[in-house]
Amino acid sequence: MDKNIVSSDIANDLLSKLMSERIPVHALLTLPSGSQAKIFGFVTECSVEKGFTISEDRPQSPASGFILIPLEGIHTEVSFGDEREAPPKDRETLVPKFGNATLVIRFLESGEFLVLIFTL
């Protein structure tokens, strides 16, 4: 995916759409140490003050897995892309399995990345 940088307003609108329309997402959080966390679920909370949560269940239950992403005061770079940007061989195998759109959030100070893959 090329660097299709989007504004924080567009990113928030997209996260709100994912939440309100209950669109399933594949999420991958990558830390600078090489540690990773993956989850398949839904955006269950989304606000500038609280950030957003991706949870296996909606509504989130105490036993469900989740990733909580705080956003207030955190500097990010957000990119959006869709299947047209993927190489044809990847498109044929990955789109049916994971989705046709990608939102990548890069946390500038920490070096963390969060990748959300979904179908619009």
Image: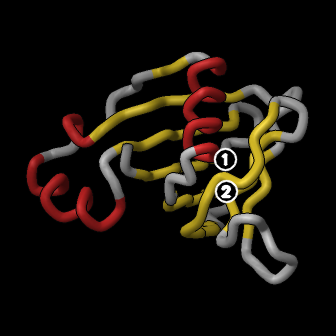
The quadrant in which the C terminus is found is top left
Badge number at residue 112: 1
Q: Mark 1 vs mark 2: which is more N-terminal?
A: 2
**54 on left or right of 74:** left
Q: From mark 1 to mark 2, how far is it between C-alphas?
A: 5 Å
Percent from the top left, x then y, of residue 113?
60, 47
Q: Looking at this rendering, what residue extends furthest in the left direction?
A: 88
SS for dot 1: loop
Percent from the top left, x then y, of residue 40?
55, 68
Please report contact status of discs 1 and 2: CB closer than 8 Å, yes or no: yes
Report the residue at 73% width, 61% height from top. 67
SS for dot 2: loop
Report the residue at 69% width, 31% height from top. 108
The quadrant in which the N terminus is found is top left
Colour approach in the figure: secondary structure
Q: What residue type is labelled 2?
A: Leu
**74 on left or right of 91:** right
Q: Quadrant of residue 16?
A: top right
Other residues around mark 2 within 10 Å, as few (<14) / some (14–19) / many (≥20)? some
- According to the picture, the residue beneath numbered tag 2 turns out to be 31
User: In this figure, what is the number of numbered marks?
Assistant: 2
Q: Which amino acid does label 1 sit on?
A: Glu
**44 on left or right of 10:** right
Q: In this view, does 40 lie above or below 9?
A: below
Report the residue at 18% width, 52% height from top. 91
Closer to us: 86 or 60: 60
Percent from the top left, x then y, of residue 73?
88, 27
Q: Is residue 27 above or below residue 107?
A: below
Percent from the top left, x then y, of residue 44?
72, 54
Other residues around mark 1 within 10 Å, as few (<14) / some (14–19) / many (≥20)? some
Q: In which quarter of the image is residue 89?
A: bottom left
